[in-house]
Image (cartoon, rainbow, N blue to C red):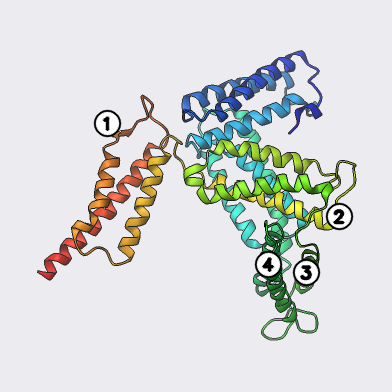
Amino acid sequence: METPAFPMPKDAQETHILQKLTSIRDQLLLLKRDRSKYIRSQDVIYLYEQVVEQVRQLNEIRKGENRGENQLDRILESCLQLLSLFFMTIGRTTEAPAAYALTSTIKRLLDHLGEAGLFSAKDLDSIAQTLGTLDKILHNTDSQHSPYLLELLANRQELCKQSLIKLRQDLTVLDEPLLAIHEKLISILRSMSLANTKAKFSVTEVQRLQTQIKEVDASRVDGQFVSSEGKPLRGSDKVSDLAKRCLLWSDIVLDRKGVIPENFKAKYETLIAIRNDLEKLSITQAWSLRETDLYDYQRELDKHDESRVDGNFLDDDGNPAELYVQRTLLYLIRRSYGYIYYLMISSEPVSEALLPVYNQLQTLKRCLVEVKNSGGVSTVRELYPYSMKLNSIDNMRVDGKFMVGDDVPEGQGSVSGLLAECYELNYELRVAAEEQTVGDD
């Protein structure tokens, strides 16, 4: 992500485009940092159209030639990444530009899963489902978006699919009964890595996880995992090796107790801070997340990830990290990318200007569903607080639209649909309460 590491373009026309894109990127960064007002669709579309025009000119200059990556390509990448997050922020999550940042994160996750060789079928199912959603977005997109962007997204999508296919093939060597055991070991391993990176190291917690690994390992018969008929299961050696790796890692973790050597302490603390911030956002995202904030976390993670040499981290003197440090740092990076992925796929199709109303309705809907599942209400009077809240939100509309000043933010359909669902639930509860009252009379 550090553009100075890449050469300047040699072509004068490319240099001119680089200057234009740098200016656009700076405008995007300023817009991202401005918390005094919400991000408006028209501001994002204006900058998006400028980037699309520069991309058109770049394609005409290069005419499909691969001249190697230079600073122009990296600045363009930053612009597209930012614009993608902006599209999420303004609620246009089902349009092609919004998919760009998500494909970047998915590619990182798949690369890391392949590198570590530690993943379960559940991990791959989630990513496959997201790629299926992105497929629909690309196939249903309209002509307003740049053909270059659509082609680029299709290529990135295909790379992700190929990686996914390869990873899935690695799991086909396991018989069905072993998949559950394999998934359990992966889960234990991750729980142990989490315990290893907590502010206060708990020996008891790691020992408890180690006991679970030993129980799985002890279930083998003559060194093999066997079926209910006593026959060795296909893939038994693979899962046995995983159990050994888990036991070895538990011994290392108990020995080191979360202590990181001084020469990697700064990097560790930076990655811990990123992981913790993203973890908090994953809990409070509905109220506190602006998707564009993810750009800074992505940029920092990419920088650390790409700084590795032959897969390992180096200290300031060029010395490689020992196994314990390497695995701990990689866990933090992978965990952080996982949080970013979760936050992106959880992005609501509503502008941040409407999120306060949308979130209130989400909470109100959950309360009404809970009341319904608990047997409803005894009297209509008990529904008054819900009815008053619904009416107060409904009265915010002007000519059927939720306005912010003179703007009509994105996501009107989603908010209005949620409001209608709440009204329907409230009506059902009121009818049931009235019928109960008549029956009692």
Q: Which mark is residue 322?
A: 2
Query: What separation in Å lies between label 1 and label 2 (alpha carbons)?
Result: 65 Å
Q: Mark 3, residues whose alpha carbon is within 10 Å: few (<14), some, or many (≥20)?
A: some
Mark whose residue sits in front, 4 or 3: 4
Q: Mark 3 points at which residue?
A: 238
Residue 379 relative to residue 226: left or right: left
- In this view, the residue in front, 37 or 167, is 37
- In this view, the residue in front, 145 or 364, is 364
Q: Which of marks 4 and 3 is nearer the N terminus?
A: 4
Q: Mark 4 points at which residue?
A: 188
Residue 434 relative to residue 301: left or right: left
Label 3 with label 2: CB-CB less than 8 Å: no
Quadrant of the rendered structure where residue 246 is? bottom right
Q: Which of marks 3 and 1 is nearer the N terminus?
A: 3
Quadrant of the rendered structure where residue 226 is? bottom right
Query: What separation in Å lies between label 3 and label 1 (alpha carbons)?
Result: 63 Å
| Residue occupying the point 74% across, 16% down | 15
Number of marks in the image?
Answer: 4
Q: Earlier in the sequence, mark 1 or mark 2?
A: 2
Query: What separation in Å lies between label 2 and label 4 (alpha carbons)?
Result: 22 Å
Residue 400 relative to residue 136: left or right: left
Label 1 with label 2: CB-CB less than 8 Å: no
Above or below, comparing residue 75 to residue 198 in the picture: above
Q: Residue 246 carries which label?
A: none
Name the amino acid type tagged 1: Asp
Q: Where is residue 231 in the image (x, y as percent from the top left)?
A: 73, 83
The image quadrant where one finds the C terminus is: bottom left
Mark whose residue sits in front, 4 or 1: 4
Q: Mark 1 points at which residue?
A: 399
